Amino acid sequence: MGPSTPVEVGCSGWEKGTRTVDASLAALEFSQLVKRCDHLVRQPPLDRACLLISAVFDRDADIERCEAQLDDIADAARRSAGSATDSYAIAHAVSKELFTERSFTGNTANYDDPRNSLLSCVLERRSGIPITLSIVLMEVARRVGLALDGVGLPGHFVVRYPDATSRLFIDAFARGQILDASDCIRMVDRQSSGRITWTDSFLEPVKPRAILKRVLVNLKNSLSQAKNYAAALSAIELQLALDPEDPTELRDRGILFARLHRYDRAIADLEAYLERSPDAADVKQIRDTVLRYLREARNL
């Protein structure tokens, strides 16, 4: 699928293991899945979509085994909940199984590790970033009949308790810590150093498609930071399958092509970005500086 073959990630390390699922087939299935959900006006299943993303990059990924892991955690949480019918009690049982019994936790030591964005690796290592740990929590809860919503705060991701009027949230990155709205406000203020003005819309639930988009943005950024530009390009291709109309992905793909010295592709993408986003804040810089440099570099 992507424009080049990325360096692959194994959960235990770089370029390790025997590939379980063909990356190109996984990318194709992801593309078909999100398009089919568009056609049916429904959201893609988070677990399957995230595991397909994983299979593009993680040569160790075994989708069926990962789904069985989620099933196993859900079975244990169901036993722990017993005869409880109260949604808060069931959510507590799921949270306890994940964060106390199985020790899922936030990866504070290597937050930018690309593996933190791959659900297969998060399940294997029991460590990840807020959004992927929240996905584990939501998908286990779904298996026990409990619908939990994800909430995409600026710079963080939490899970809302299963009551549309609830102002309580679970922080999966902090091993299931319970937050209220004021905690969320303080967190955003602290992480942004006061640069973000709070609005209650931050507490609105986000749909699976938006969650997948955020996962892919995180993955693209972490791969770019690791200078694995070919893999970052593959993340962008998945992003464009999810949202073909997002011009920022054209811009970012153009920048990555430039870093790989593929100047014709870089110029084409950046010109398309300027055409689609004539009022963007970075138009002048891209037109007058970046594109000029790329055209000169191409002719050297």
Image (spheres, rainbow, N blue to C red):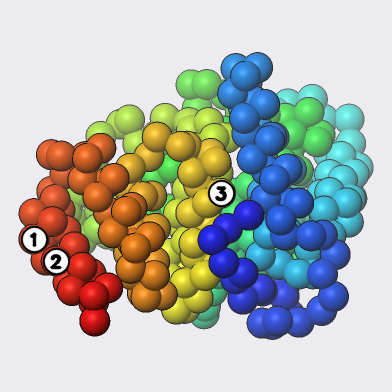
Q: Kindly identify the amino acid type of the residue bearing the numbered disc 2.
A: Arg
- In this rendering, the label closer to the viewer, 2 or 3: 2
> From what the image shows, is residue 90 above or below residue 271?
above
Q: Which residue is mark 2?
A: 292
Nearest to N terminus: mark 1 or mark 3: 3
* Whether label 2 touches label 3, CB < 8 Å: no
Picture mark count: 3
Front-lying residue, 167 or 36: 36
Q: Which residue is mark 1?
A: 288
What secondary structure is marked by label 2? helix
Q: Which residue is mark 3?
A: 238
In terms of image quadrants, where is residue 252? bottom left
Front-lying residue, 2 or 129: 2
Structural distance between the alpha carbons of marks 2 and 1: 6 Å
Front-lying residue, 22 or 86: 22
Residue at figure coordinates x 66%, y 82% from the top left: 14
Q: Is residue 226 visible?
A: yes
Q: Quadrant of the N terminus?
A: bottom right
Residue 216 vs residue 270: left or right? right
Structural distance between the alpha carbons of marks 2 and 3: 29 Å
